[in-house]
Image (spheres, rainbow, N blue to C red):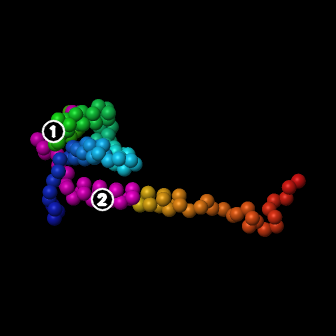
Amino acid sequence: MCRDSRIIPGAAATEIELAKRLKEFSLKETGLDQYAVAKFAESFEMVPRTLAENAGLSAMDVISSLYAEHASGNVKVGIDLEEGACKDITTLKIWDLYVTKFFALKYSADAACTVLRVDQIIMAKPAGGPRRDAQPGGGMDED
């Protein structure tokens, strides 16, 4: 199928586990780093949220069920869209390619960092426009 045939649990099981571990890691950080890591962890919830909403399920119920299952050690639990429940995805044989998830994460993080770098450059530049003392003819006429 491809050169790297490693597989990981699909149906949002991997994303919820990553979100859970990143949230735990964020609690160990201090300062602004803590909030940045927590928000990055929150972004992983978009996959199960989108899956649930597209299946007509309550996204909040599904995400809270997934977190509860993963907190109790069931790291391979994902969303069974046909039954609308959280189940062990390995028994349903729902898998994702590791390389797909790897590059999706790599490029999305790179894109976010690029946007932040550009934003920092824009914020560092002084506001544009002509200076008041540089207007030819002394500026606008006053009546």
Element at badge 2?
helix
Q: Secondary structure at mark 1?
A: loop
Does residue 89 show up magenta in the picture? yes
Cα distance between the residues tagged 1 and 2: 26 Å
Q: Residue at x 70, y 63 (%)?
A: 131
Residue 63 lies, with reference to residue 98, above or below; the image says above
Badge 2 local density, few (<14 within 10 Å), some, or many (20+)?
A: few
- Magenta span: 84-113
Most prominent secondary structure in the magenta stretch?
helix
Q: Which residue is mark 2?
A: 106
- Residue at horizontal 20%, vertical 38%? 70
Left or right: where 87 falls relative to 42: left
- Decide which of 54, 95 is in the foreground and name it: 95
Q: Quadrant of residue 73?
A: top left
Residue that badge 1 annotates: 73
* Proximity of marks 1 and 2: CB atoms separated by less than 8 Å: no
Q: Given the image, on which type of amino acid does mark 2 rest?
A: Lys
